[in-house]
Amino acid sequence: MNFARYARHPFWQAVAILVLAFVVIEWGIPALPGSAIVPASVVLQYMATVLVGVLIYVSDSEERWALFKAPLHAALVEPRLKPVRVTGLVLLPLLVGAVTLGQVRATVQAPPSLRSIHPAPPPEITFRGKTMTLTGLENPLRARPDSLPAFVAEGRRIYYQNCLPCHGDHLDGQGHYAAGFNPLPANFQDNGTIAQLTESFVFWRIAKGGPGLPREGTPWNSAMPRWEDFLTEREIWSVITFLYDQTGWKPRTWEKTGGEMRDAGGGHD
């Protein structure tokens, strides 16, 4: 078999690109440090993008387009390839039937437990090897009010570099990739998100991402990564400062009563 001839053929190049893209998206990306499983909807979205790119490439010239179509035309009309046509006519309906059956078939599994949108945080976490107690923890940047505008500016830069595709330009959870996620990215403008939370809670969720959710917070199938793998502690606090400044919400605060810290609530400016 002349592999070099196949490697130069546009049809087999297109097949190889599609297969390679699927392998990278489905298995390569989740294998990276700090990455998570890519949702099926996102895989489909990226594969559709790759397919469009491949079709643009193979149709860029008449010669390449003719070569690309040749194997498809041969499989459809040439007598010697009749077994290929028959196999396709048998396997394709079976594949569609199997997928349909898997989607509609009743199961005997117990219904999944309800997912908590704001699960209870742990009393302490480990951030880059450093133990942090969340109970009673305040944003340390707010202890430097003169520098707060600079921290907000830093948080804005980090947000637009890292968070914009999912959470959106208006911090409303309507980023470019939002439609591919279930559940949708958090809408920070809604009074049911950061307006109800302490900044230590927000730090925990950003630092640990979806993989760090406790049991009551699952199932998790969005693309929220562990941002502690990419951002420093100060950068995360800066982003949090920017979120509250941009939305106008005030974080819930801690009050000390009877020697214990308790959540004292928050609100809007």
Image (tube, rainbow, N blue to C red):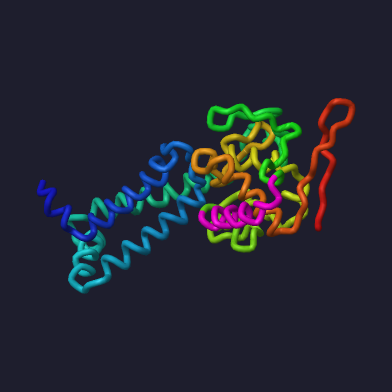
**From the viewer's perspective, is residue 182 above or below residue 118?**
below
Q: Nearer the viewer, residue 7 or 230?
A: 230
Q: Is residue 17 visible?
A: yes
Q: Residue at x 80, y 38 (%)?
A: 254
List x then y, in percent, for residue 16: 27, 51
The residue sitting at 31% across, 62% down in the picture is 54
Residue at the far bottom in the pictured view: 62
Residue placed at 51% from the left, 51% from the top?
41
Q: How many marks can you see? A: 0
Q: In the rendered view, tell whether residue 49 sits above or below residue 185.
A: below
- The residue lying toward the viewer, choosing from 98 and 174, is 174
Above/below status of 232 relative to 43: above
Residue 79: image location, x then y, percent: 18, 59
Q: Check if residue 151 falls in the magenta segment.
A: yes
Q: Quadrant of the C terminus?
A: bottom right
In this view of the protein, which residue sits in the foreground, 200 or 105? 200
Going by the image, does 74 lie left or right of 251? left
Q: Residue 184 location, x and y as percent?
A: 63, 52
Q: Is residue 94 left or right of residue 66?
A: right
Q: Residue furthest left?
A: 2
Q: Is residue 117 visible?
A: no
Span shown in magenta: 144-161
User: Which residue occupies the extreme right position in the image?
Assistant: 258
Residue 19: say if magenta: no
Is 23 or 74 nearer to us in this picture?
Answer: 23
